[in-house]
Amino acid sequence: MLDQELKKQLSQFLDLMEGDVVFKVSAGSDDHSQKLNDLVNEVAEMSPRITVEKAELKRTPSFSVNRPGEDTGITFAGVPLGHEFNSFVLALLQVSGRAPKEEQSVIDQIKSINEPLNFETFVSLTCQKCPDVVQAINLMSVINPNITHTMIDGAVFKEESEDIMAVPSIFLNGEQFGSGRMTVTDILSELGQGPDASEFEGKETYDVLVIGGGPASASSAIYAARKGLRTGIVADRIGGQVNDTADIENYIGVTKTNGPALSSNLEQHINDYNVDVMKGVRAEALRKTDEGTEIVLNNGATLQTKSLIIATGARWRQLGVPGEQEFANKGVAYCPHCDGPLFEGKDVAVVG
């Protein structure tokens, strides 16, 4: 299943495991089940910390990633290769005990969820946006035992995904929850678990406050901070629309990169300066004051600033045809790589 170069890289990751892991496998006699068996057994043979057990799970073929004697709630329905191979490896490491690379405030928000949340995410293995969602909800499942998550390959479970027109497509407790790339903070915000207003109490007035998280916002904040001004950023997510971009080849000075990588670089650059970054929140209202401007956030908190920069970016260009908005991600698709496998055998029209 895995070529020698990939096995060499995987071996280095497996050395980072901190505890034992059990794969519980539900497989039949079909080709997909054979591929799944080949994958999990090949990986298990590479580490004495991994064992494989037969099980009856909700879907076949599928397997769950667990600690011995404990179900962690992470299941892969289908064979997690392609872009989802990294999701599989990351889940393996985190279940083994590797600490998640996430801010403590976000981890605390995840831990505070005290109701059962059963997520299912339909993906295609050619989708570049899907792994972000799979990895985000897997992380939540590792941190909080109330949360479970199943990645479902729509190309394998075709009958179940018959009405899925775009990926990633996320369901929570059987109901549609979201679609498209979502980060942990996006998901927490949708669940009403974003930063509490109390976290913003007592913040001093900013010299410059930037609303938005894209490249223009990052540039504004960095240059303001370089001048010694008390600077803050309010953003749903750092990177903004860039996060949803695949290959980027028109950024002067960088031959080629991708959206998530550039967004990560933007955040690292911002963090090199004394910038108060407030993620997972949005500005809902602005009020002029004698000292400057008051910003009301969607969690009820208020911020004060002497100067305000609004850099909320752009939206994807649309055709303006009837039904485009109503049927977005419900038949109207924008990414042939991500959504193409879902339309196999169906009549499609391509507009470009």
Image: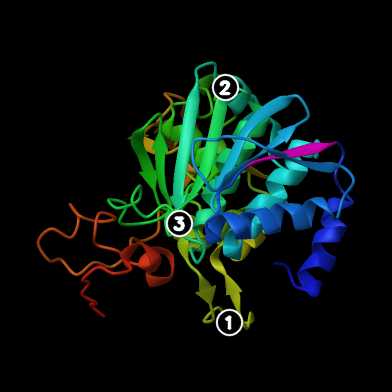
**Majority SS type along the magenta span:** strand
Q: Nearer the viewer, residue 57 or 80?
A: 57
Query: Which mark is on residue 252?
Result: 1
- Dot 1 and dot 2 residues touching (CB under 8 Å): no
Q: Is residue 234 above or below residue 287?
A: below
- Residue type beneath disc 3: Val
Whether residue 87 sits left or right of residue 16 in the image: it is left
Which of the image's four quarters has the N terminus? bottom right
Which mark's residue is nearer the viewer, 1 or 3? 3
* Numbered label tally: 3
Residue bearing mark 2? 146
Q: Position of residue 339 (x, y in %)?
A: 38, 64
Q: Residue 22 in magenta?
A: yes
Q: Position of residue 291 (x, y in %)?
A: 45, 33
Q: Position of residue 245 (x, y in %)?
A: 48, 66
The disc, 1 or 3, on the residue closer to the chain's N-terminal end is 3
Q: Which mark is residue 156?
A: 3
First-in-chain label (1 vs 2)? 2
The answer to which quarter of the image holds residue 258 is bottom right
Residue 334 horizontal side relative to residue 88, left or right: left
Q: Quadrant of residue 22?
A: top right
Q: Nearer the viewer, residue 49 or 174?
A: 49
Can the viewer see residue 244? yes
Figure check: 224 above or below 22 = below
Of 12 and 68, the residue lying toward us: 68
Decide: marks 1, 3 in contact (CB < 8 A)?
no
On-image quarter of the C terminus: bottom left
Nearest-to-viewer mark from 3 and 2: 3
Q: Which residues are magenta?
A: 20-25
Q: Residues within 10 Å of mark 3 (few under 14, many from 20)?
A: some
The residue at 44%/26% (across/down) is 192
Instruction: Indicate whether residue 59 is drawn in magenta.
Output: no
